[in-house]
């Protein structure tokens, strides 16, 4: 179990866990998950951390087939500028290793933003807190349990 799955179980949120054999040589953790689980890549989301000009860490959940729009995230968060967070700071703050960072069950609650495209799906897939482990849940359930806002933060 991971903190993400513990949280979902505790709050009795509807979800399904999917696991696969992670290949350490995989170029993209998210695309690997989509491929190994035979999923539509647009339905699989990666969790990224960015830092504002004031040093506030922000969580961004975007499709694995695209990238994070830093200006879009800054606008959504009401800050001037954001840049990708230092990997060590991301790991320290979330309690997860890179490639397995889940938006759920993080050590510190950070402001979280989910790309609007997630709302087009009945369910989406995000990391369950470990490489090779994904959790499938409704976008609204993810937003509820991360206190996230939906925003235009992804780029195709």
Image (cartoon, helix red, strand yellow):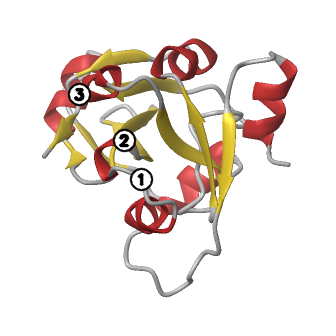
Q: Earlier in the sequence, mark 1 or mark 3?
A: 1
The secondary structure type at the circle numbered 2 is helix
Q: Which mark is residue 130?
A: none
Q: Which mark is residue 74?
A: 3
Q: Which residue is mark 1?
A: 39
Instruction: Please tell me which residue is depicted at 48% across the width and 87% down the height of the picture.
Output: 25
Locate residue 133 relative to residue 118 in the image: left or right: right
Is disc 2 surrounded by few (<14), some (14 to 19) or many (20+) residues within 10 Å?
A: many
The secondary structure type at the circle numbered 3 is helix
Residue at mark 1 to residue at mark 3: CA–CA distance: 30 Å
In percent of width and height, residue 37 lies at 51, 60
Between label 1 and label 2, give the one nearer the viewer: 1
Instruction: Please tell me which residue is depicted at 38% across the width and 78% down the height of the picture.
Output: 27
In percent of width and height, residue 64 lies at 33, 52
In percent of width and height, residue 148 lies at 47, 17
Confirm or deny contact between disc 3 and disc 2 (CB under 8 A).
Answer: no
Between label 3 and label 2, give the one nearer the viewer: 2
Quarter assignment of residue 61:
top left
Instruction: Please tell me which residue is depicted at 60% across the width and 75% down the height of the picture.
Output: 22
Give 44 or 27, whichever is nearer the viewer. Answer: 44
Q: Residue furthest front?
A: 38
Residue at mark 3 to residue at mark 2: CA–CA distance: 24 Å
Instruction: Please tell me which residue is depicted at 56% across the width and 82% down the height of the picture.
Output: 23
Give 52 or 123, whichever is nearer the viewer. Answer: 123
Is disc 3 surrounded by few (<14), some (14 to 19) or many (20+) residues within 10 Å?
A: many
Is disc 1 surrounded by few (<14), some (14 to 19) or many (20+) residues within 10 Å?
A: some
Q: Which mark is residue 43?
A: 2
* Vertical comparison of 32 with 15: above or below: below
Locate residue 130 relative to residue 2 in the image: left or right: left
The secondary structure type at the circle numbered 1 is loop
Q: Earlier in the sequence, mark 3 or mark 2?
A: 2
Locate residue 140 relative to residue 75 in the image: left or right: right
């Amino acid at each position: 179990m991971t903190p993400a799955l513990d949280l979902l179980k505790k709050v009795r949120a509807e979800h399904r866990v999917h696991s696969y054999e992670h290949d350490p040589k995989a170029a993209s953790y998210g695309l690997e998950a989509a491929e190994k689980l035979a999923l539509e890549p647009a339905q699989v989301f990666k969790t990224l951390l960015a830092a504002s000009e004031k040093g506030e860490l922000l969580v961004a959940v975007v499709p694995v087939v695209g990238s994070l729009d830093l200006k879009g995230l800054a606008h959504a968060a009401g800050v001037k500028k954001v840049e990708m967070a230092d990997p060590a700071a991301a790991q320290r703050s979330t309690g997860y290793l890179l490639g397995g960072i889940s938006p759920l069950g993080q050590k510190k609650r950070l402001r979280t933003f989910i790309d609007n495209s997630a709302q087009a799906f009945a369910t989406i897939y995000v990391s369950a807190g470990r490489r090779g482990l994904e959790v499938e849940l409704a976008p609204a359930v993810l937003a509820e349990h991360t206190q996230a806002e939906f925003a235009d933060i992804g780029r195709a």
